[in-house]
Amino acid sequence: MWLYVPRMKTASLLTSFGEGKTQATRNLLPRKLDPSDTFNEVAAATLASTRFQYVLRVGEMRGYSALLSALVERWRPETHTFHLPVGEVTVTLEDVSYILGLPINGEPVTGRTDSSHQFLVENCIACFGREPGPQDHVLEKVNIAWVRQCRDIEPCDTQESLERYVRAHIFCVLGTIMFPDKSTTSLNSKFLPLLRDFHRISAYSWGAASLAHLYRSLCRASRYNCKEMDDPLILLFVWAWERMPLLAPIPRDQLGDDGIPLARRWSHWRRHTRYTSWRPTAHFRRGLDDMGVDDVSCNHSADKKLTGQGQLQEGCVHPSGQNLCTLPSLSSYVPNDDHHRMPTPISQHRSHRTIEYMPHLAL
């Protein structure tokens, strides 16, 4: 059985921070960030029934080794938070909902692991209507390029064809945005059984699973010998730019307002290529070291809630149907005296100068 939960590690690259010691620069190399490229609008209504319609709008985004390395150095596996001079911050379920537009309510993303060829073939036929050839999979991993071919040749003239098309598209999204490996070219076949029953795809908490995958990947990347990351980098980068605007390549007020998902607004500034070419890891380290409480944003730029049409309106209903008024608040918190990390609003404890966005994983 497998279940997406964050793993606890005891070692971290952050052991020397705050003690006046220096660390060697380590360039984690993020792979390309390329969501699924095309989509047939004929299948839009069918896709909406799965609650994956918003993550479809995430555009192309570039990766930044220097920023990634600086963030990983601040990650503490023991608490699953980034440690800053002003306190601790982390990515939450509400961040996932806003940034990627994924559902965060529902059943846990879990299942059984089976590396047999028969398991892969049976589930590919059930999901995509076709059997992969020897060159279309490696062990238990399915080649995403082959899945895209299956998707693109679907005529979408019947309900069964539409469902196969949407399953293939969701599988590409899982492999490139939510659970990518280090190459973003393949995805484990263990996800296929979750797509077989089309009407149950919307029942899973895909956002919570993506967040748990991010936590686990950051824990792995905090090891000194790790050179690459296989986490949802789009989620991590957009979270950093939204929550800590000093790290962003361009001020947020210069970006358009594209609604949910917030990641879409950050896919429109390809002209700002100097951000990657001359800003070293030391630049982002200094930015994190000099960051004050007022430099960390407690609210998203799209905190006005959205209607089903994606327009900014008053209210508390997310386009996926979730009532955001009942979600964990991203207000600032400080740990209580018994060190059990029970939230207490920082508005009542300004002298502590500690901010902490604690995760609420419904797994």
Image: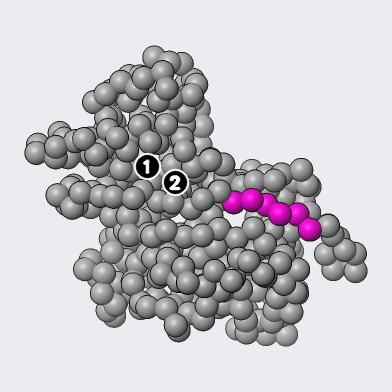
Residue 190 has which mark?
Answer: none
Percent position of residue 17, x then y:
83, 64
Residue found 42% across the figure and 66% down from its top:
267
Q: Quarter of the image holding residue 136?
A: top left
Residue 9 makes an appearance in the image: no
Residue on which disc 1 sits: 172
Percent position of residue 53, x then y:
28, 55
175 left or right of 352? Answer: left
20 left or right of 124? Answer: right
- Secondary structure under tag 2 reads helix
Farthest residue to the right: give it. 20
- Secondary structure under tag 1 reads helix
Q: Is residue 294 magenta?
A: no
Relative height, residue 350 to residue 237 (above, below): below
Residue found 46% across the figure and 31% down from its top:
188
Type of amino acid under label 1: Cys
Name the foreground residue: 149 vs 327: 149
17 left or right of 239? Answer: right
Percent position of residue 143, x then y:
42, 31
Name the foreground residue: 227 vs 49: 227
Residue 311 makes an appearance in the image: yes
Residue found 42% across the figure and 22% down from its top:
135
Type of amino acid under label 2: Thr
Residue found 38% across the figure and 60% down from its top:
59
Relative height, residue 183 to residue 332 (above, below): above
Relative height, residue 15 to residue 257 (above, below): above
Contact? badges 1 and 2 (CB < 8 Å): yes
Residue on which disc 2 sits: 176
Q: Which residues are magenta?
A: 25-30
- Main SS category, magenta section: loop
| Cα distance between the residues tagged 1 and 2 | 6 Å
* Disc 1 crowd, CA 10 A, few/some/many (<14, 14-19, 20+): many
